[in-house]
Amino acid sequence: MNSPKVVVEGLCKVFGSNPKQALAMLAGGATKEDVFARTGQIVGVHNVSFEVQEGEIFVLMGLSGSGKSTLIRLINRLVEPTAGKVLIDGRDVAAVPRGELIAVRRKDMSMVFQSFALMPQRNVLSNAAFGLEVAGIGRKEREARAMTVLEQVGLAPFAHKLPSELSGGMQQRVGLARALAVNPSLMIMDEAFSALDPLKRKEMQNVLLELQREQQRTILFVSHDLEEAMRIGTRIAIMEGGRVVQIGTPQEIIKNPADDYVRAFFEGIDTSRYLTAGDLMQTDAVPLMHAPQIDASSVAATLNGSADYAFVLDGARRIRGFVCRDASGSASPQLNQIESIHRSTPLNDVVERVVASRAPLPVVEADGSYCGSVNKTNVLNVLSRHRGSHV
């Protein structure tokens, strides 16, 4: 990841006639409910700060009324902030003169909404090219660019159909294509898939993830669905009462929920599906040896005690193979080949590999260096811990 694409600092929004009074009350420890009861003013967002890195999908989630939709509208300034900053590529959107805002939105950000918001009288191609038309791009160029994006989302054969001739999932693909066609540096997706049935929803998540693998856009994605957030989010920010209560990767939030509100999101969800080899591994369960000093005596010394296996590493801590006891129980210097697992490998793939292997499996970093091991016992322990109440 590179420099932050979006920086939000101390962002607040109070709906009412005297926001300074509300901010003073909040600073004194009052809740949004206290402020409303005493002043009638509504706190939409209070003192929110976070950064979104270039190329990540940053998911904002929370229950209805938690402030996530207000926050997204503060970021693209459809709603005026009461206090705080929103920096996109270092430029404070909250301070941009209103006359320049339209140009910023056209060039720097695209929105995809829950309602598909397509123009019924225009065909798919014309809908996809609409943002480029508004930006003054000539017909030939805008249609060529829109067609390229329709191919990316699998809609090229439907370019000349009307929206009414498409399913809901396909209509949402058109909405996604329209947002992508302007080649935004930031995409904002507000509950974009929540109107779709579960199968179509998963299909659209797959389309988004596939596009993200190819294009590495920066995406702010609003959702109230934890499973969706865990599936697509690089990081997740969970909101309650206008505040951000926790930010982290899906794995960080599963392992260390900040409070009971965050914990409640996991009720009835099998969180083990979001674990990776890095969450399962142990760092010191298997002894290590360093090539080329592998002979019968060094192997015997390393396997002295209860160890049956030792991994052999080269000078860059990359796995060369493993040594073990032979059929008679004696330590053998013979080097056996073994395949490593990347630490980001999802649990289901880890289970398949571990079950098929008689030895523990080495876990490696992105650069191939050794970082730990997984075996059948690790996997069973983690599965029983995460699936206990869900099976």
Image: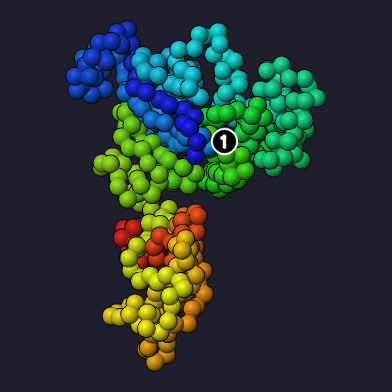
Residue sitting farthest toward the bottom: 328
Number of disc labels: 1
Quadrant of the snapshot with the C terminus: bottom left
Residue 170 position in % (x across, y down): 65, 39
Residue 20 found in image quarter: top left
Q: Check the image and tell me how it is coloured.
A: rainbow
Picture layout, residue 308 above or below residue 257: below
Residue 225 position in % (x across, y down): 43, 41
Picture layout, residue 310 above or below residue 110: below
Q: Classify residue 160 as left or right of residue 221.
A: right
Residue sitting farthest toward the front: 293
Question: Mark 1 Cα within 10 Å, few/some/many (few <14, many 20+)?
Answer: some
* Residue at x 49% of width, y 54% of height: 366
Residue 357 position in % (x across, y down): 47, 75
Kind of element beneath mark 1: loop
Q: Is residue 270 visible?
A: no
Q: Classify residue 84 as left or right of residue 353.
A: left
Q: Classify residue 139 as left or right of residue 264.
A: right
Residue 51 position in % (x across, y down): 42, 31
Looking at the picture, tell me which residue is in the foreground, 200 or 84. Answer: 84
Residue sitting farthest toward the right: 140
According to the picture, the residue beneath numbered tag 1 turns out to be 217
Picture layout, residue 385 above or below residue 146: below
* Residue at x 60% of width, y 20% of height: 106
* Residue at x 34% of width, y 62% of height: 283
Q: Is residue 326 visible?
A: yes
Looking at the picture, tell me which residue is in the foreground, 148 or 41. Answer: 148
* Residue at x 46% of width, y 56% of height: 365
Q: Mark 1 is on which residue type?
A: Arg
Residue 307 found in image quarter: bottom left
